[in-house]
Amino acid sequence: MHMLYNSENFAVMRFSGNTTAGQGFEIVDKTSRREIYLGGLLADHFQAGVEYLISQTDDEARIDDFLAGYTTLAHHPVVLH
């Protein structure tokens, strides 16, 4: 697991895959306390979108807006063990 991004509103971790599924990303929405895991083709699409966005800007608000588009799908509450 590798922390890629951490703001007041979001955290993004990358998981390197040792399986055929490859890498995955976990996006945590700190405001709603929900998370989503992206794997497979969705992870590839997410990575391409992030790389493009970062090449255009480093504005935290724009990055958070991008992440919010993915976390609208998040239904899993964040649970700490």
Image (tube, rainbow, N blue to C red):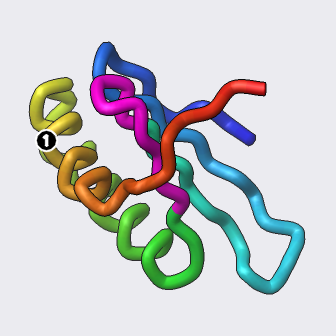
Which residue is identified by label 1? 65
Spot occupied by residue 71 in the image (x, y as percentages of width and height): 30, 51
Q: Residue at x 13, y 41 (%)?
A: 65
Quadrant containing the N terminus is: top right
Spot occupied by residue 7 in the image (x, y as percentages of width and height): 34, 19
Q: Measured along the vertical axis of the image, is residue 80 above or below residue 29?
A: above
Toward which corner of the image does residue 25 lie, by quadrant? bottom right
SS class, disc 1 = helix
Toward which corner of the image does residue 29 lie, by quadrant? top left
Give the camera-side residue of 18 and 55: 18
Give the side of residue 21 with respect to residue 24, left or right.
right
Magenta stretch: includes residue 32:
yes
Give the camera-side residue of 77 and 2: 77
Magenta span: 29-37
Q: Measured along the vertical axis of the image, is residue 58 above or below residue 43?
A: above
The residue carrying pointer 1 sits among few (fewer than 14), some (14 to 19) or many (20 or more) residues within 10 Å by Cα, namely few
Q: Residue at x 62, y 48 (%)?
A: 14
Q: Measured along the vertical axis of the image, is residue 33 above or below residue 40?
A: above
Give the camera-side residue of 73 and 44: 73
Magenta stretch: includes residue 9:
no
Give the side of residue 47 with respect to residue 26, left or right.
left
Spot occupied by residue 60 in the image (x, y as percentages of width and height): 19, 25
Q: Residue furthest top?
A: 8
Toward which corner of the image does residue 52 lie, by quadrant? bottom left
Give the side of residue 73 with respect to residue 26, left or right.
left
Q: Measured along the vertical axis of the image, is residue 8 above or below residue 30?
A: above
Give the side of residue 22 with respect to residue 44, left or right.
right
Amino acid type, mark 1 = Asp
Spot occupied by residue 19 in the image (x, y as percentages of width and height): 86, 77
Q: Residue at x 11, y 36 (%)?
A: 62
Quadrant containing the C terminus is: top right
Q: Residue at x 37, y 25 (%)?
A: 30
